[in-house]
Amino acid sequence: MYSLKYKVTTSTCDSEGRLKLYSALQMMQDCSEMWIDSEPGVKQYFAEQNMAQLLASRQVEVIRVPEYKEELTVTSTVYGMKPMFGFRNTFIYDAEGKPCYRTWSMGAFVDKENGKLKRVDDATIASMTLEPQLEMNYKDRRIILPKEGGETLDPIRVLRADIDYNKHLNNANYIRIAMELLPEDFEVKGLRVEYRVPAKLGDQLIPTMYQIDGGIIVSLSIGSEVSTIIEFKLD
């Protein structure tokens, strides 16, 4: 397990003084990335093999949105590991230890040089400390796009400020971009995101919006290829 302490500050709040979902996702992502420091054997193996773990999918349940100056604890635990994929829970808890956000995610292990999937050896997998899978409503990581009814909107350019150290559009920024397309009164209670093709600096993301029962799906494409799909739910 790896944990980080946070406080809801001005820069992480929306206009109503509540934690932005984008900011919560950044907290989750940071904790997930730092988790490897709790597993020195895995960290050494990834460094020697020039490997990285890239987020492939994430599901988020919003239980309660924290407010300005609240103290939060983010924890990240791995509950499953296969040769090319890892599975983790990342939860955000309030000062009383009650969950505000529950998430699970799948990461893909890749070669940093060519970006292709790369296997982790059995000895490294066996050395891992696996934690119990935490309770939440687990849904399929795959998001099926409706066959018709999508509304295509103006392209959005990927900017320098959107890029992280992997030279890709940062994971949380896909959500930030898509949320700007939602109606102002849309309060996200559930979220699934499927990352397919990473966007890079200067790419044009073409959004297509689909109305679904109890929510909205936003597909972000690069040319004819789907980059990322985000499902936003009202319940």
Image (cartoon, rainbow, N blue to C red):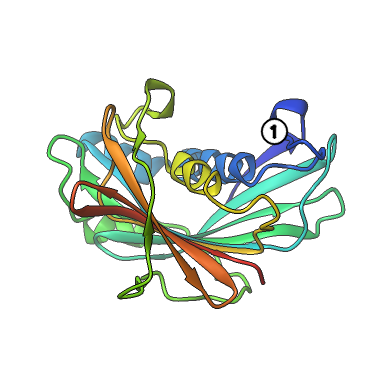
Give how far across and how far down residue 95 sits, in percent.
85, 48
Q: Looking at the picture, tell me which residue is in the foreground, 53 or 178.
A: 178
Q: Looking at the picture, tell me which residue is in the foreground, 103 or 169.
A: 169
The C terminus lies in quadrant: bottom right
Give how far across and how far down residue 86 sits, in percent.
37, 60
Name the residue at 30% across, 65% down.
82
Q: In this view, does 27 lie above or below 220?
A: above
Name the residue at 80% across, 50% down.
94
Q: Name the residue under label 1.
A: 12
Give the amino acid at mark 1. Answer: Thr
Q: Quadrant of residue 103?
A: bottom right
Give how far across and how far down residue 198 sits, in percent.
28, 44
Q: Looking at the picture, tell me which residue is in the foreground, 8 or 223.
A: 223
Is 131 placed left or right of 166 in the picture?
right
Give how far across and how far down residue 99 sits, in percent.
74, 60
Q: In this view, does 158 lie above or below 81?
A: above
As helix, strand or loop, the secondary structure at mark 1 comes to: helix
